[in-house]
Image (tube, rainbow, N blue to C red):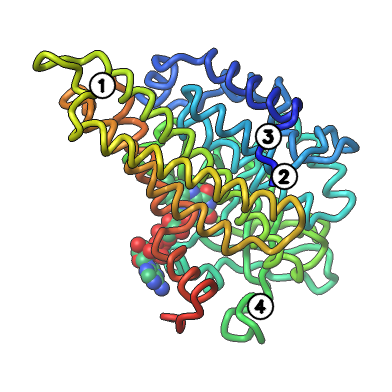
Amino acid sequence: MNFDLTEEQKQIYDNSLAIAKKFNPKYWRTKDDNSEFPTEFWDEVSKSGLPSIPFPVSYGGLGLGLFELLLAVEAISRGGGGMDGAAIFPTGPAYGGLSILNGGTPSQKEELLPKVCKGELISLALTESESGSNVTRMKTFARGSENGEHYEINGTKQFISIAREAKHIVLAARTIEYERAEKKTDGIGLFICDTPSPNISFQTYRKCGFHMIDTSELAIRGLVVTSSRILGGDDKHAWPVLTNTLNASRLVFAIGAVGTGNLCLDIAVDYAKSRKVWDKPIGSHQGVAFPLVESYVGLEVARLAIYKAAWLYDNNRECSVETSVAKFQAVNAAFKAADDAMQTLGGLGYMQESDVERHWRNVRLLKMVPITQQMTATFLGTKALGLPRSY
Ligand SMILES: Cc1cc2nc3c(=O)[nH]c(=O)nc-3n(C[C@H](O)[C@H](O)[C@H](O)COP(=O)(O)OP(=O)(O)OC[C@H]3O[C@@H](n4cnc5c(N)ncnc54)[C@H](O)[C@@H]3O)c2cc1C
């Protein structure tokens, strides 16, 4: 087993770190305060070609793998972007790009992948209020026309991120009602929809964190989509494509969490070395040091788990258990690191100027997104341990 990075991989990490360093904490704080998308940051990321990392050269990509994309996301988050910077990557290259790469028709790939490589954003609309984590019970319905030329889509999607910024939305809709489908994963289509559209209206939520990223309810009324826009050309591809894409995007979120956890540790360690309330720096007290060490260990373990899962993904091997292990560990470790960092900074940790409170709010979301920790545990219970299913 060789853990050395190649020269190219090191360069990707270093270049990404350099991009992250161009945007100081004040930039992120202001964007968060103003609920403003970090356009300047994403423009810089796009110019540098980072979104193109996992796509074939023929579509304008770098022809590398998910692993190299994860190196970039880790450097962006650790270098100061935190989850604010990392959370845009699932939307562009992962949700949209990898779905199209893995399941799109040749013309869908030719049209959309070069745009994804240039940083165009494609969001994913899966979640609905009634079905929640049980996504196969979605009610959004795509009715095919008699001549087979188009579908008309109606329904409501909940908690959809970056749909206002995105140029397209990969929208999941049933083509066969759940009750009539032979298998519950049958009869689901992924539709590539253009936005803005008069047939999709947005209601944006106010939320606890991630203020610079919009999260909205989408009301889809009478949206007509031509059959050429169903991913892969029919409704047979959605589930395997979704599983693959969700594995990849969970790893993107997970590595963003690890980078953010390490960023919080960096802030905490610096502070613990210099802050004296008695005669010695607070970092010399084991009550301060040990939680930071535990967080460090947790993040190291998470990174290894992510690298392993990414290796399996890039080698076209089954990786859903490894991805779940990695996501579960990364999120717990990152939240612990953010929380320990806040405690290390004392009252200052609760203040916006420390930045830790923003990272803490953002990392907390990952216990729910893109899949909840309980659903991840439920999956691991059945798939890794062979326990009976709870549902
Ligand atoms: C800020 C934000 C951004 C998001 N962005 C997107 C996006 O871009 N696209 C998208 O499609 N979705 C998005 N989501 C939706 C997100 O993926 C869901 O919120 C998440 O999957 C959980 O679904 P739910 O909120 O309906 O919770 P529910 O499914 O209602 O679950 C509620 C609670 O019950 C638990 N629970 C449910 N069933 C079980 C079970 N069988 N065993 C144990 N526990 C269980 C859950 O773990 C959870 O704690 C976003 C959500 C948020 C908050």
Please state if 128 lies on the left or on the right of 57 as rendered: left
Q: Secondary structure at mark 1?
A: helix
Query: Which residue lies under the disc numbered 3?
Result: 4
Q: CA distance from mark 4 to mark 3?
A: 49 Å
Q: CA distance from mark 2 to mark 1?
A: 42 Å
Which quarter holds ligand 1? bottom left
Q: Residues within 10 Å of mark 4 (few under 14, many from 20)?
A: some
> Percent x, y for residue 20?
54, 20
Please state if 180 lies on the left or on the right of 192 as rendered: left
Answer yes or no: do the residues labelled 2 and 1 have beta carbons within 8 Å? no
- Nearest to N terminus: mark 3 or mark 2: 3
Answer yes or no: do the residues labelled 1 and 4 have beta carbons within 8 Å? no
Q: CA distance from mark 1 to mark 3?
A: 31 Å
Q: CA distance from mark 1 to mark 4?
A: 58 Å
Please state if 108 lies on the left or on the right of 128 as rendered: right
Is any atom of residue 260 visible in this view?
yes
Q: Residues within 10 Å of mark 2 (few under 14, many from 20)?
A: many
